[in-house]
Structure formats: C-alpha cells, structure tokens
C-alpha cells in the first residue's frame, strides 16, 4: 500500500476547513449536552461523522480510516475501559460485603463536614490515584466514594471532575510529561520544571473553586483555612518536586503530603458551622441521597482496618504497576510491539505541523500485565477472597459488572476511536493550525489548544503527543519559548479533562447515574472554560510581562 500524506486545508480555505474539522467533536459534545441522545448513541453518531469527514473532506483512504477506527476502539478498551470495569468491580464487592459502609463512617469520623470530606476525597485522594494510575482512575474511584458517602450523583460526578485538574499534567507517574518530551524532543525534566511553575497557582485555586462550586461563596469562606492548608501543602511540594527532583513522582508526593497536612489540621481546627447537606448548593434535581453515616456508628479496630484493606492493597499494587522497572521488565518479555497492518508508517505528517515530513507510527502493544486495570483486577480478586467471596461468586459478580457497564464501555470505545481517527486523518492538525494563526495572542490560544486536545482525546498524554510538535514549531516561528508553550499545552490541557466525554461517562458510570451525562457536562463546562482562560492568561504573562518572564525555564 502506498503512503498517504495528510491534507490540512482540503477546501483551500482555512476557515471552511477548520469548521468541517470541528464537526465530529462538536457534534459529540452537542448531542451529549442536549440530553436527548444517550451517550453511547452520541458517540456512535460522532464516530460515523468522523469517518465520513476523514474520507470525504480530508481525502483519507477508506481502508486506512477503518483501520484507524478499529485501532482507536482497541486502545479505548485497553487501557481506559479496562480500568473502569475493574475499579467498579472492586467497589461493588466492598459495597456488597458492607466494608464500604465502614469507610463511610471512618471518613465521617475525620470530619462530618461535607466540604472538608470533598477536599480529602476528591482533591487529595484523587490526586494520589492520578499520580499512581491516571487514565480515568481518580474520577472513577472518588466519584464512587463520594456517592457512597451520600453525595448527590451530580455533586459526586461533577465535583470529582473539577478536582481532577491540577494533578493531571503529572499523572500516571509523569506519562503526560514523557509524551510531551517524545513529541517535542525537549528534555522531560525541563518540561516538568516549566509545568511546575504554572500549575502550583491552580493547585491553590482549585480547592477553593471546588468548595465554592459545591457550597457557594459563603460556604467556602467558612472553611477557607482548611482549603488554604490543602492547596498550599499540595502546590509547594508540586513545585519543589517538579523543579528539584523529577516529574515522575510529583502527584504521589504532593498528594500524600497534602492529605497528611489536612488530616493533621482537622485535628486542631473545625468550622463553626458543620455542613451536612450532600447536595449542591444550587438546585439539584438528582435522585435523593443517603444520609451521612452517624459518628456513633463508626467502627474501630480490626473491622476498620479490614475495610480499608482493599484500598491499601490498591495503592500498593498501582504504585508497583506504575513503576518504570516493573513496566519495562514485563513489557519487554510479554508485550512485543505489533505494527497495525495497512496503517503503520503509511501516513505522513507534513509541514507546517512538523518540521519535515514524518511517518505516523501505528503500533499496538498488548501490555496486559502492566495495564492499570489489570492491577486493579488483581486487587479486586485478592480483596474478594479476603472478604470471603467464593471464586464462583466473584465470577458472577464480575459478569454482573460487565452487564451493568455495557453501554458506558461502548461509549468509551467509540470516543477513543474518534480521537485516534482525527489524529491519523489530520483533522486534529487542522484545528491546531487554526490556533497557531493567532500571532501575538498565541500564548493564550496555544494554551486553549491543549484544552481542546484533552477535550477531544480524553487524555493529557494524547493531547501532548498530538500537539506538542506543533506547539514547538509555532512558538519558535513567533520567537516565544518552545519550553513555555509545550508546557502550556499540558497545563491548559488539564482543564479540558473535566469536559471530555470519556471522563463524563466515567463519572456517570462510577455514580450509577447513567443517562445523565448532559447534566454533568452542563455543570462542569463553564468551570472548565473559565479555568483554562486563567491558565492562558498566566501563560501570556509568562511570555511577555516581567517579572513573570523570569519564571520561564530555558534549555
């Protein structure tokens, strides 16, 4: 099969080409936001539109388009769908055994205040899982925990998405930074340092934003000391670790320190008014929520240790699973790279997206033994046996989990297929070039490009791989630091995490709130847009205004 060169302006009119390129993602978000189309049908429709546009408008050969779609669907289930399936399996086991109810009481024993529970679970606990695993794990875990604590479904889903922002650029043991380094050729330590000089501002802001979104301005101000302790104890280690140690352990280190500081602070301080409502401050027409577990029912000793055991095992396993030495060892032996026939190195990216024509690799590695989802499955099986489930009961429970998640899994697979197809067809590059044409405003719109990339692909790592090269080329042409703009792609991208359709489906699945994805999207969209605009404003200052320019890392 002869190579095919990507076309970025198929209509000879950049505005028209950009409008056509935005159709698949725009259609997907519009259908979900409408609330009239189920998420899995919206994803299927958007996928069909993406195939049609790739072939008809962007001249991609049909055979290549179908192969790219199948490749994306496969990578949609492994690892994303695999994570969701197994973390929900673990959660359902702990609920059935009654151990999760004990955890509810234990958390309430730390603080019965819903705002402070939100900081502890959604921000601190979620940041740890982002650092250890990433790829949907933190939203799945924290949303499930919050719904179990009695938070309303909209609150549990939407607030978990908002909380899962500031840690994302260093998530999955630095995978987004490594992906960015691969795409740009820039030292990952320099990129990590630059991201570490952007995100700490938002690591302080996001906890305030999170509580305000839940409880309003007055409710937030009542607990501002605890919020400040949470934000600073995360932001300062985030800066120090990223700038003076390495970008791989930033989230794990910062989250553990933040969690310890918050719990320690709550031992000596408590708000005058205890906020016990699990619903959002604004009208929340979701299903009624469970009451907060009374403190008098909190169990201690051995039952409490056993209740936490599955989650302790999960933390240990995921830390092991994410380590470089483990992944390298098992992947080299058991997961050889397999080229996708008819696609691998047969598509060429062309200038100005890349400096020189370059073939697009299409390699699939079935890294089953290092998939995060496999580690979670192992945790669930060990925990299930410890909890007293028989092997046959575990098999039946797993089958029930698969059946419960059949539609969300279809949705996730289709969404990753859309993201992969837009990459191989050049649709993503057309959108990127539209942002690159903004001239002196490029630091702002380049940041927005990272946001768009994550909204489209569901992954900061994928967005960095897609647009990292373009950020470097464009910034060099405009005389702006390529390290600054490459980092801005990742920092801006974290705010797109809360609106990508994949994360929304994960949140709705974790809370059991199927069919309400539109409500979740409408709740988080403006938060996402305002926050990425603030990131863009910071990058503009770092590009042009002293003393912010002193923060820019130079290679």
Image (tube, rainbow, N blue to C red):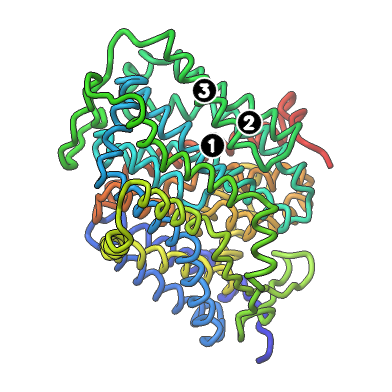
Instruction: Identify the mark at residue 491; answer none if there is no mark.
Output: none
Q: Nearer the viewer, residue 223 or 111?
A: 111
Marks 1 and 2: which is nearer the front? Answer: 2
Task: Please name the residue shown 15% across and 38% down the image.
Answer: 288
Helix, strand, or loop for circle 2?
A: helix
**Residue hosting label 2:** 238
Left or right: residue 115 compared with residue 193 = left
**Residue hosting label 1:** 166
Left or right: residue 418 compared with residue 323 = left
Number of residues whose C-alpha sits closer than 10 Å to that of mark 3, classed few (under 14), some (14–19) or many (20 or more):
some
Q: Nearer the viewer, residue 326 or 241?
A: 326
**Residue hosting label 3:** 260
Task: Please name the residue shown 40% across and 44% down the image.
Answer: 141
Total numbered labels placed on residues in the image: 3
Where is residue 27? Give x, y as percent.
37, 63
Q: Nearer the viewer, residue 390 or 95?
A: 390
Task: Please name the residue shown 22% across and 60% down the image.
Answer: 36
Where is residue 90? Give x, y as percent.
36, 50
Where is residue 276? Give x, y as percent.
24, 22
Marks 3 and 1: which is nearer the front? Answer: 3
Q: Does the residue at mark 3 contact the one at mark 1 (Cβ under 8 Å)?
A: no
Judged from this view, the residue extending furthest toward the right is 555
CA separation in Å, label 1 and label 2 = 10 Å
CA separation in Å, label 3 and label 1 = 18 Å
Where is residue 29? Give x, y as percent.
37, 57
Does label 1 or label 2 sit earlier along the sequence? 1
CA separation in Å, label 2 and label 3 = 15 Å
């Amino acid at each position: 099969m002869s190579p095919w060169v990507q076309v970025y302006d198929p209509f000879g009119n950049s505005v028209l080409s950009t409008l056509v390129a935005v159709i698949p993602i725009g259609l997907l978000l519009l259908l979900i936001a409408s609330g009239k189309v189920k998420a899995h049908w919206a994803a299927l429709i958007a996928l069909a539109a993406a195939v049609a546009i790739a072939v008809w408008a962007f001249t991609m050969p049909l055979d290549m388009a179908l192969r790219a779609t199948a490749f994306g669907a496969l990578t949609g289930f492994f690892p994303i769908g695999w994570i969701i399936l197994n973390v929900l399996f673990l959660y359902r086991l702990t609920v059935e055994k009654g151990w999760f109810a004990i955890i509810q009481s234990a958390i309430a024993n730390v603080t019965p205040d819903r705002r402070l529970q939100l900081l502890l679970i959604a921000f601190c606990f979620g940041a740890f899982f982002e650092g250890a695993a990433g790829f949907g794990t933190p939203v799945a875990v924290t949303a499930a925990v919050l719904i179990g604590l009695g938070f309303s479904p909209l609150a549990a889903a939407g607030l978990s998405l908002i909380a899962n922002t500031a840690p994302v650029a260093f998530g999955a043991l630095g995978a987004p930074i490594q992906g960015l380094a691969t795409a740009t050729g820039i030292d990952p330590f320099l990129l990590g340092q630059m991201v570490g000089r952007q995100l700490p501002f938002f690591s302080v802001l996001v906890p305030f934003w999170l509580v305000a979104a839940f409880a309003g301005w007055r409710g937030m101000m009542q607990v501002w000391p605890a919020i400040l302790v949470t934000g600073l104890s995360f932001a300062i280690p985030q800066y120090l670790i990223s700038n003076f140690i390495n970008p791989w352990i930033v989230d794990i280190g910062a989250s553990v320190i933040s969690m310890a500081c918050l719990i320690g602070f709550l031992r000596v301080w408590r708000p005058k008014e205890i906020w016990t409502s699990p619903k959002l401050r604004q009208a929340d027409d979701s299903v009624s929520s469970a009451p907060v577990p009374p403190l008098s029912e909190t169990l201690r000793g051995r039952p409490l240790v056993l209740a936490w055991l599955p989650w302790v095992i999960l933390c240990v396993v995921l830390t092991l699973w994410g380590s470089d030495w483990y992944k390298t060892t098992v992947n080299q032996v058991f997961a050889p790279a397999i080229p996708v026939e008819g696609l691998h190195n047969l598509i060429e990216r062309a200038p100005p997206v890349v400096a020189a024509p370059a073939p697009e690799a299409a390699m699939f590695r079935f890294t089953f033994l290092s998939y995060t989802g496999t580690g979670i499955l192992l945790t669930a099986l060990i925990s299930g046996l410890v909890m007293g489930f028989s092997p046959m009961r575990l098999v039946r429970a797993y089958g029930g989990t698969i059946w419960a998640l059949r539609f969300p899994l279809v949705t996730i697979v289709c969404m990753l297929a859309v993201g992969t197809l837009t990459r191989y067809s050049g649709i993503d590059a057309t959108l990127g070039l539209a942002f690159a044409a903004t001239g002196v405003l490029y630091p702002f719109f380049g940041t927005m490009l990272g946001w768009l990339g994550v909204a489209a692909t569901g992954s900061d790592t994928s967005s960095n791989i897609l647009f990292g090269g373009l950020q470097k080329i464009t910034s060099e042409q405009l005389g702006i630091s390529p390290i600054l703009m490459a980092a801005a792609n990742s920092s801006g991208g974290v705010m797109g995490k809360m609106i990508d359709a994949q994360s929304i489906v994960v949140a709705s699945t974790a809370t059991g709130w199927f069919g309400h994805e539109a409500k979740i999207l409408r709740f988080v969209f403006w938060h996402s847009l305002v926050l990425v605009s603030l990131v863009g404003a910071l990058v503009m200052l770092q590009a042009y205004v002293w003393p912010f320019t002193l923060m820019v890392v130079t290679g």
